[in-house]
Amino acid sequence: MEKKNIDWSNLGFGYISTEKRYVSDYKNGAWDEGVLTEDATVTLSECAGVLQYAQTVFEGLKAYTTEDGHIVVFRPDLNASRLADSAKRLEMPVVPEEKFLDAVTQVVKANAAYVPPYGTGATLYIRPYIFGTNAVIGVKPASEYQFRVFATPVGPYFKGGAKPLTLCVSDFDRAAPHGTGHIKAGLNYAMSLHAIVTAHANGYDENMYLDSATRTKVEETGGANFLFVTKDNKIVTPHSDTILPSITRRSLMYVAQHYLGLEVEEREVYFDEVKDFAECGLCGTAAVISPVGKIVNHGEEICFPSGMEKMGPTTQKLYDTLTGIQMGRIEAPEGWIRVVE
């Protein structure tokens, strides 16, 4: 299979239309069989539930070319489970796990020519999503939905690669207690757009959101979980019911404990203790781990000992081990890698 003529090493994190995507409709209480199509357009009623009341949830995962030439997907069963949790929270129909996995597999196979070659640093990003399609004018759940999956080749999420980021403590709240911060709903990301545009305008790479109830505890950024390294080399990640349960973060914590022999802890992390950590990183599907060099809280700077030039040593080991597992250089735990072809 011949790959597309794309400058893989210089890809940004943007949308490139590929040849096939998957579409399935939900009507009369059931999902149809679903098909692959070349049509990248979506036609909707002007009164569609997704347009009126933001009834949409989504996922993000990646396909990779491994060292031995296979195309694989990383832990898609967890994406299926998280999409189901998101759908339930917004009163949307759940896509069964087998249907989800089959759709992802079909899309990756159909777009195999767009899966970047091994060693380029690029991947095939996969976006499954569900949205309400029928006309809804009263405030209530839609009765008809569409489940779609498309794929696009991408480079690193942050253009600077492993260069440490500068964050600011946001004046905005990301999620309310008992709200929707723990699910991957489009509405959560819509409310973060003003905050990230403001951060960029002020010269920062990302926001650090604190808990909205007390504004004393670290939550996450707009699109990634935090991971800290203590000065005695313990891995600490914030725990909160309003944090999205990142698959990458959970994988990194497992890698830290079972591959690197490090002590790990998921707990409430107070902002006051951030200054005492040795390293800080942002972890998520898109970025894997991006190191943080500095956090600014209204003029007060917290500079991590790992510095502004490169990843800290422990963060680097975590990154190298997880990407080694994803790329087939290191043996994966059972069930983590789904071979597509």
Image: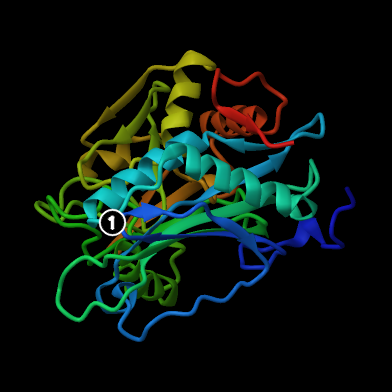
* Residue 120 picture location, percent across and down: 78, 48
Figure colour scheme: rainbow
Q: Residue furthest right?
A: 2
Name the residue located 43 percent from the left edge and 41 percent from the top edge.
80
Which residue position holds label 1? 92
Q: Quadrant of residue 133?
A: bottom left
Q: Residue furthest left?
A: 213
Q: Say if 230 sits above or below 215 in the image.
A: above
Q: Say which element carries label 1.
A: loop
- Asked whether 138 or 1 is in front, the reply is 138
Name the residue located 22 percent from the left edge and 51 percent from the top edge.
89
Q: Say if 158 sits above or below 201 in the image.
A: above
Q: Residues within 10 Å of mark 1 (few under 14, many from 20)?
A: many
- Asked if residue 106 lies left or right of residue 200, the reply is right
* Residue 247 picture location, percent across and down: 44, 38
Which amino acid, mark 1? Met
Name the residue located 47 percent from the left edge and 34 percent from the top edge.
77
